[in-house]
Amino acid sequence: MGWGYVDHACPGEDGLPDPRPAGARRYDALMVVVGRGLGHPGAPPSAARASVIITVRADPATGRPQGAACTQTGQVLTASQAGRFACTGDLTPVVLGEHDEPLRLGRTQRLASAGQFKALVVRDEGCVYPGCTVPATWCEAHHIVWWCRGGPTDIDTLALLCPRHHTHVHDRNLGITVAGGYATVKV
């Protein structure tokens, strides 16, 4: 018996196949496994993430970030890409002034603490996206009011999403509400 793998797209909660090519699905799965292992080698899975610094220019009149963001390696990111990375990594946004001087460092206490993550595991029990069955330990804490939009890291402003639905929620700018101890995605 050999190591087989499914090369066709398994249907999602809507019954439609995952639109990503097989290679992209395998890559995403591998990155989830690697990311979990690198967070705490030898320890049980955790929500630890990589740390990245992203710079963005500020509007001289308002001081608010504007335009594209750049990584330390020179990769240019759109505002939506930077927002998505801000949700899944230890991202420190650095707002630059007219002469590339750092004006403001972003908040760096963004990730849910181990205690907060455990509370989310108990409350959400898994990915809160409708129909998803991914268990809580394979999910990420998502800011209902996105971190890059000023959202706090509090239990009542966090919800668990699997990596696939986390990206989906960001790409489609979907909202989530928490009421009565239940998180609900507005699809």
Image: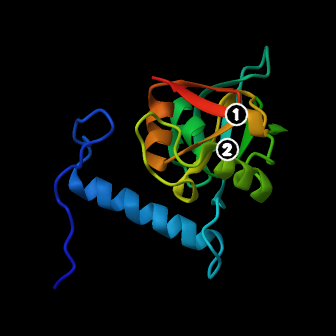
Name the image quarter holding residue 40. Answer: bottom right
Nearest the viewer among 146 and 76 is 146
Q: Which residue is mark 1?
A: 181
Quick one: quadrant of the C terminus? top left
The answer to whether marks 1 and 2 mark residues whose Cβ atoms lie closer than 8 Å is: yes
Residue drawn at point x = 72 percent, y = 20 percent: 59
Q: Under tag 2, what secondary structure?
A: helix
Residue 36: x and y, percent? 56, 66
Q: Is residue 79 visible?
A: yes
Identity of the amino acid at label 1? Answer: Gly
Q: Residue furthest top?
A: 61
Q: Which residue is mark 2?
A: 123
Mark 1 closeness class: few <14, some 14–19, many ≥20 residues within 10 Å: few
Nearest the viewer among 89 and 131 is 131
Name the image quarter holding residue 159. Answer: top right
Count numbered badges in the picture. 2
What is the spatial separation of the Cα atoms under label 1 and label 2, in whole angstroms?
7 Å
